[in-house]
């Protein structure tokens, strides 16, 4: 966690090949441990084993639920697990953080992040019921007690008192155009929290249309990050009650805002 010295945490290299019931995934577990070591990222005991097991669950269920394009466990580890963990060196997740993963799909990035940060709690938001069934199955099978799943549309959650201004962090990976993601995510954030968008872009690449939209919603786009790609939008004010709008209205507004507003994440 961001408030915990790295030297005081258990590292992935300390986990046994069978940790988390993932003995049959020892090759994939070793890949995660080696990656974490090279990137100076500490993981709790058993986290690498559970992550490898999760990748196996995705591949196993892929034929039934069309979850991802990954056809092997090794590919799922690279794309879903390590792809979700990649920005850990650039983001701060303090102990006690409550986060939302919007458009979670198969549970990414939320499940790998929750395994990496067990002191956090998270809500995985997904509109497709079959995918939510898989997420809930995975949370029980692994298990991941600090996560829950919600079947619903993110823009509708942002208008519900229970969820509005309820989260310290919101994560979005491959959810849609940046303009749309910002409007859906910022109503969920507390003031002082931030949205992290997985992207090859940085804030400075987005242009005025998106930056101005973030300001309207009580946010501020961080322009340039020296430590790598990814878009951070900080919540510095209140989001007006009129937002988020319904998805068709958000999409039309994104198109009117210009080409830079259509950047996919």
Image (cartoon, helix red, strand yellow):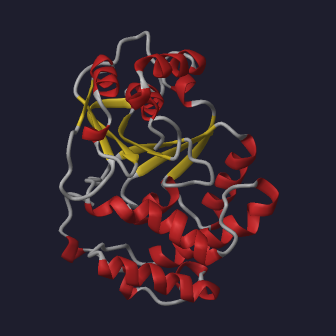
Pick whichever, 89 or 156, lies toward us: 89
Left or right for 56, reference 256: right
Q: Indicate whether 47 appears above or below 4.
A: below
Kindly indicate the quadrant of the structure image that contains residue 54.
Answer: bottom right
Pinpoint residue 127: horizontal percent, then vertical percent: 65, 36
**Residue at coordinates 56% horizontally, 41% vertically from top-left?**
103
Residue 160 seen in the figure:
no
Kindly indicate the quadrant of the structure image that contains residue 8.
Answer: bottom left
Pinpoint residue 196: horizontal percent, then vertical percent: 35, 44
Pinpoint residue 160: horizontal percent, then vertical percent: 51, 20
**Residue at coordinates 21% horizontally, 59% vertically from top-left?**
227
Q: Indicate whether 115 appears above or below 45.
A: above
**Residue at coordinates 40% horizontally, 49% vertically from top-left?**
199
- The image quadrant where one finds the N terminus is bottom left
**Residue at coordinates 51% horizontally, 19% vertically from top-left?**
250
Pick whichever, 256 or 49, lies toward us: 256
Left or right for 27, reference 215: right
């Amino acid at each position: 966690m961001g408030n915990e010295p790295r030297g005081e945490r258990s590292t992935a290299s300390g986990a046994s090949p069978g940790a988390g019931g993932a003995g049959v995934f020892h090759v994939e577990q070793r890949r995660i441990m080696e990656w974490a070591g090279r990137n100076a990222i500490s993981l709790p005991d058993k986290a690498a084993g559970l992550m490898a097991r999760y990748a196996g669950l995705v591949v196993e269920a892929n034929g039934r639920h069309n979850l991802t394009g990954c056809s092997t466990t090794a590919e799922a580890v690279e794309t879903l697990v390590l792809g979700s963990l990649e920005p850990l060196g650039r983001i701060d997740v303090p102990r006690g953080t409550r986060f939302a993963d919007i458009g979670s799909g198969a549970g990414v990035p939320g499940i790998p992040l929750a395994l990496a940060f067990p002191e956090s709690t998270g809500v995985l938001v997904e509109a497709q019921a079959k995918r939510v069934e898989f997420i809930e199955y995975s949370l029980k099978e692994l298990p991941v007690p600090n996560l829950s799943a919600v079947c619903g549309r993110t823009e509708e959650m942002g208008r519900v008192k229970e969820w509005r201004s309820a989260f310290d962090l919101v994560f979005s990976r491959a959810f849609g155009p940046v303009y749309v993601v910002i409007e859906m995510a910022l109503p969920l954030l507390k003031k002082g929290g931030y949205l992290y968008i997985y992207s090859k872009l940085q804030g400075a690449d987005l242009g005025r249309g998106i930056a101005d939209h973030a300001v309207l919603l009580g946010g501020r786009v961080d322009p340039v990050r020296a430590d790598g790609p990814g878009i951070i939008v900080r919540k510095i004010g209140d989001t007006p009650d009129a937002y988020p709008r319904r998805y068709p209205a958000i999409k039309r507004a994104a198109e009117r805002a210009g080409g830079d507003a259509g950047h996919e994440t």
